[in-house]
Image: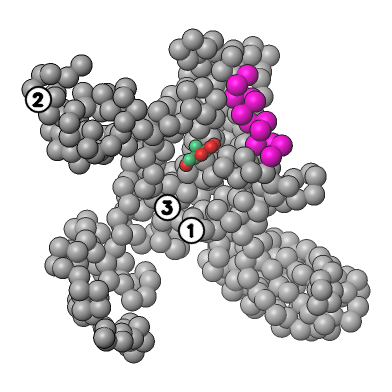
Amino acid sequence: MSEERSSEISGFYRLSIEERRRKLKEWASLTDAELAAYDFPPGVGAGILDRMIENVVGCFPLPLGIATNFRINAKDYLVPMAIEEPSVVAAASNAAKLARAGGGFAAQSSTPVMIGQVQLLDVPDPAAARIRILAERDSLLAAANAKDPMLVKFGGGAREVEVRIVPSPRGTMVIVHLLVDARDAGGMNAVNTMCEALAPTLARLSGGRALLRIISNLAVFRLARASATFPREKLADGERTGAEVVEAILDAYTFALVDPFRCATHNKGIMNGISAVVVATGNDFRAVESGAHTFAAFHAEDGGVVKPLTTYEKDAQGNLVGSIELPMPVGLIGGATAVHPTARANVKLLGVRSASELAQVIAAVGLAQNFAALRALATEGIQRGHMELHARNIAVTAGAKPEEVDALVQRLVDEHAIRIDRARELLEELRRGTGP
Ligand code: MEV
């Protein structure tokens, strides 16, 4: 009979990384080689990561690739992308090259205003409470700003108070929104601290009680936008003319516009690019993902059906013009961006001078990623590119030497048989010089 193991390990957090690892080794009979897969890379080290989250035992390295060719607002960027999925970095680079041929991306962003929410319950007179709270706007903003003099010093701070009356199955709620210019921070700590500070006053003004005090990830006032022209003549592909490819991409885009099942995948492709840069810069990719998907549904004019985050049109010359707009709550100060050595190096590599500039770059990458996906889907299909990368992995696994990989990949792809057994046979044939 196997012995019962308990995951209730008291004081795990007090152990050193080495001690925690020893526990894991026992728990799962990990070999030394398996344990070594948790090792910290020399350029990062254990110290900082150990302080970032709890119960640290190692780190999980993702590949970091660099997307090339990006030109945004007449400035060139090399864009770091941390992602496990093949093809994403290559696709972004290719799309950026085509956008570059059309003059590059134009990008902007709104002021970096985040929303904090205070939920007020059991308010006897919600409409009158709303007026009482709005009447105190100036003192509420002053009290909020007193909580973060540094943010105010750098030109940010609480800017506005809004009050919404929201019916619910548990009675009417009065929801106060505190709008805070977060400048170069993500804003979570500043906004949450301010909301917590205002909650007792808001409860008193409303005659009810305050419950939640928390930032909203639907950052509709912190938007990033980008657009690009993809020249028609550059889009020709095999036997298809550029004009035909433009039409095919417009059909592909329109599919996402009218069908939520397609739209989810369309927007996922956008987030392939966006999340990869958000992760590489140490930002909160869940906040960006959540905001993007809720924004896509929130802005649907027809009652909550999700909409694509991008738009495609033809200009007067028949070129394809793509654009994107979405919330982009990313920061450069505070949070992991400022402490994680790889994130810091990536920010330096990007050469962005503000969180707004970073948001613009990320929006441009999202547009590039989406354009690349639509172009592939609307022409040769997505699998060919994917299969080549898959074949490359299979070729290496089959034992191909670096100088043999290209020829073997070509044969595997031509045969549509990307399997390890066939790769071994073809490699033998290649080496004997008996292949086709
Ligand atoms: C795959 O990760 C992303 C795509 O499915 C996006 C799309 O279909 O637009 C290729």
Please give left or right for residue 123 compared with residue 243 in the image.
right
- Up the image or down, 320 lies above or below 122; here it is above
Numbered mark located on residue 431 in the image: 2
At which x and y percent is residue 7?
A: 35, 83
Residue 79 on image: x %, y %: 39, 39
Q: Position of residue 213 (x, y in %)?
A: 65, 74
Q: Residue at x 41, y 56 (%)?
A: 282
Nearest the eye: 38 or 432: 432
Q: Quick one: SS at disc 2?
A: helix
Separation of residues labelled 3 and 1 (CA atoms): 7 Å
Magenta residues, start to end = 247-259
What is the residue that sits farthest to the bottom in this orientation?
10
Query: Which residue is tagged 1?
Result: 284
- The quarter of the image holding the C terminus is top left
Mark 1 residue element: loop
Pointer 1 local density, CA inside 10 Å: few below 14, some 14–19, many at least 20: some
Residue 119 shown left or right of residue 97 in the figure: right
The prevailing secondary structure element of the residues shown in magenta is helix
